[in-house]
Image (tube, rainbow, N blue to C red):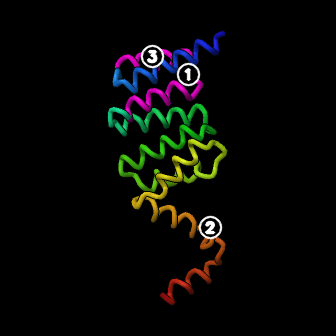
Amino acid sequence: MQDDILELLISIGHYARVHRRFDEARYLFDRLALVYPQRAFPYLGLGLVELDRANYRGASLLFGRAVEVVPDSALAGAWLGVCQVFEGHYALGARMLMTVADGDEPGASSMAAAFLNLPECVPYTRAAQVAPAAASLSTIERLTKRNRH
């Protein structure tokens, strides 16, 4: 029964958010954060309210809080990476999105993959793919390659 009520409250918060009733949505998610401070969903709801308001910095902080309390939340990581990209922190956002892209949570991984394909993120994605190969080279090999180019 309690889970049903919680689900209903979360749905009401998102309904308010979608219908641009930001104050009501924020109020509800704030109260849920007081009751469930160690769960990700209240901070995700609050972050989405800020994202809908185009307050990317505020959304990043809230999604970051969700990641702090539930480090393995792929959805929180994906939304944090998206907001970092929106803020213009492409390298930071790409790194966060790469941690989520190959995960088991389909919604989070597909969102991460889509944002990693943005022209602003592609250079950082490529650099991360090249870095492990370069790290396996010895110092002499790296210096030799650098001096050839």
The answer to which of marks 1 and 3 sits earlier in the sequence is 3
Q: Please tell me whether mark 2 sits on a helix, a strand or a loop.
A: helix
> Between marks 1 and 3, how big is the CA–CA gap?
13 Å
The answer to which of marks 3 and 2 sits earlier in the sequence is 3
Say whether marks 3 and 2 touch (CB < 8 Å): no
> Between marks 3 and 2, how big is the CA–CA gap?
45 Å
Q: Residues within 10 Å of mark 3 (few under 14, many from 20)?
A: many
Residue toward you, 138 or 24: 24
Q: Please tell me whether mark 3 sits on a helix, a strand or a loop.
A: helix
The residue that mark 3 highlights is: 28
The residue that mark 2 highlights is: 132
Give the residue drawn at x 62%, y 72%. Answer: 133
- Vertical comparison of 5 with 83: above or below: above
The residue that mark 1 highlights is: 37
48 left or right of 67 in image: left
Residue 30: name its quadrant. Answer: top left
Say whether marks 1 and 2 touch (CB < 8 Å): no
Residue 40 within the segment the image draws in magenta: yes
Q: Residue 86 placed where, x, y %? A: 37, 47
Say whether marks 1 and 3 touch (CB < 8 Å): no
Give the residues in magenta.
23-51
